[in-house]
Image (tube, rainbow, N blue to C red):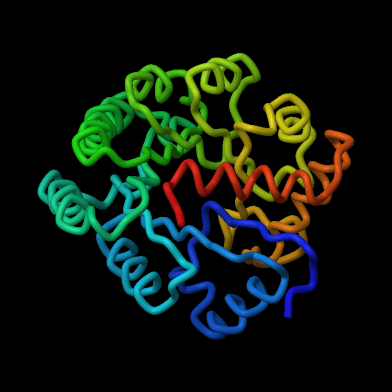
Amino acid sequence: MKENAYEVIDSHCHLDFKNFKKDRDEVIQRARSAGVVTMINSGIDLITNERTLKLAASHPFIYPTLGLSPNSLGYMSDGDVQAVLDHIREHSAEIVGVGEAGLDYYRCPDLAGRRRQVEIFQKVVDLSGELDLPQVIHARQAEDECLEMVRHLEKVVFHCYGGSMATMKEAVDLGFYISLATVVCRSAHHQVLARNVPLESLLIETDSPFLSPRRGRNEPSYVLDSVALIARIKDISLEDVARATTRNARRAFDLQ
């Protein structure tokens, strides 16, 4: 039984992570009961990509994206990276997007490390174009660089966007989607972004188990907190936010 009269989609979460090991089924059920009809689970390396596929295979309302996070590269050899790319290609028919992948300069101040991130992200972008799948971007203090590398793609989702207004507007002008995480509930900068991103370009996500709008671990049902806040910021109804973001997610990831 849904608690709300409207349906929403959590466009980015990590339900396969160990944070949900003890109560994963209960977390999923809470989300469904709250009105979260679809969850998109994102892998970040080979192990989480494999777990993401298994999770989606056992839950018809969970869709997988397979990725290669820049923050995973520190423990990965070039051979490991190629194994992830090959795995994504092998399972391309089962997924709705490639990512998360991108550049994270916040966690990598080292110039050589940043160059390697760019080199590997380029391979992911090429793969996304080859497979004709949406590119899900992880960008932190590198939004401009990421945008330059993907501007030729047809479908791009800036996951957990937290960059500048100017870059956001440029991404929107290119027809890309801006996904705001539940951190919007406690970040003035993200609230400014929420006020200015066009409704037709907006996705919502939890990025759970991270970025909780409440104390402790985040989970997909908390995406409803974002719906309420964004509705208030934009001075529209909760139903309008839910309807638009759900429609956008279905369009972005070609969901049924």
Residue closest to the eye, 207 or 89: 89
Where is 95 relative to 82, above or below? below
Residue 248: x and y in percent read: 57, 42
Q: How many marks?
A: 0
Where is 19 relative to 209, above or below? below
Left or right relative to 10: residue 92: left
Where is 74 relative to 48, above or below? above
Q: Residue at x 74, y 74 (%)?
A: 2
Q: Residue at x 61, y 77 (%)?
A: 27
Left or right relative to 134: residue 195: right
* Quadrant, the N terminus: bottom right
Residue closest to the eye, 112 or 177: 177
Residue 146 sits in quarter: top left
Left or right relative to 216: residue 11: left
Residue 39: x and y in percent read: 53, 62
Q: Residue at x 47, y 41 (%)?
A: 252
Q: Residue at x 86, y 45 (%)?
A: 237
Residue 223: x and y in percent read: 69, 57
Q: Name the outermost residue toward the left.
A: 79
Residue 144: x and y in percent read: 47, 18
